[in-house]
Amino acid sequence: MCTLLRGVNETLSSKPYNNAKQKGQRGGTPVAEAAETHLDRFIDGEALRIDKYLSSVNLVKRRTVAQDMIRSGVVFINGVQAKASREVHVGDRIEIRYLKGPRSYEVLKIPVTKTVPKSAKDEYVKELS
């Protein structure tokens, strides 16, 4: 029975995915490289999830409030109802349909930091109506 287990352990340790995990890799791609790629994309200000964008540019107070609004179906991007995972790009039009009436915004810039000072809000979003 010991030889059976020893054979199983040797077989498991020789599989490529086990070795990859031990070396800090996932599926042949180093974890650090994947994280760096994601970070570069965020730093470039290329795109940001709609729920994060709404909270970071101070259109809503908290990200959970933005997620609730999106789930309720009152947030639209370029005329299409948004999902929380939808990414916002420069030039996109965001419409929020409040009870008092809809408000439209144009994305001018994607924030690099988690939050933007309220005084700098006009650099990132332009209110259309």
Image (cartoon, rainbow, N blue to C red):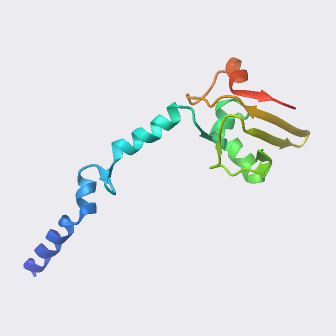
Residue 108 vertical placement versus 95 (above, below) = above
Outermost residue on the top side: it is: 119
For this rendering, which residue is in front, 45 or 113? 45
- Left or right: 83 with respect to 24? right
The residue drawn where x is 21% and y is 69% is 12
Residue with the most extreme left position: 3
Q: Could you say where residue 10 lies in the image, as x and y percent from the top left?
A: 14, 69
Picture coordinates of residue 120, whole percent (x, y): 68, 19
Residue at 35% in and 46% down: 31
> Can you name the residue that lies furthest to the front here?
91
Figure quadrant of residue 33: top left
* Relative to 115, residue 66 above or below: below
Q: Residue at point 81% right, 41% down?
A: 96
Q: Is residue 62 above or below residue 117?
A: below
Instruction: Please determine whether, in this image, residue 5 is positioned above or below residue 53.
Output: below
Q: Quadrant of residue 64?
A: top right
Instruction: Check the picture and name the quadrant holding the N terminus.
Output: bottom left
Q: Is residue 91 left or right of residue 36?
A: right
Judge by depth and name the residue closer to the eye, 66 or 26.
26
Q: Horizontal and vertical percent for residue 98?
A: 85, 41
The quadrant in which residue 7 appears is bottom left
Q: How many marks?
A: 0
Residue at the location (69% across, 22% down)? 123
- In front: 127, or 98? 127
3 left or right of 80 in image: left
Quadrant where the C terminus is found in the figure: top right
Find residue 47 and report its horizontal and vertical position in percent.
Answer: 60, 39
- 66 sits left or right of 23 in the view: right
Residue furthest to the right in view is: 100
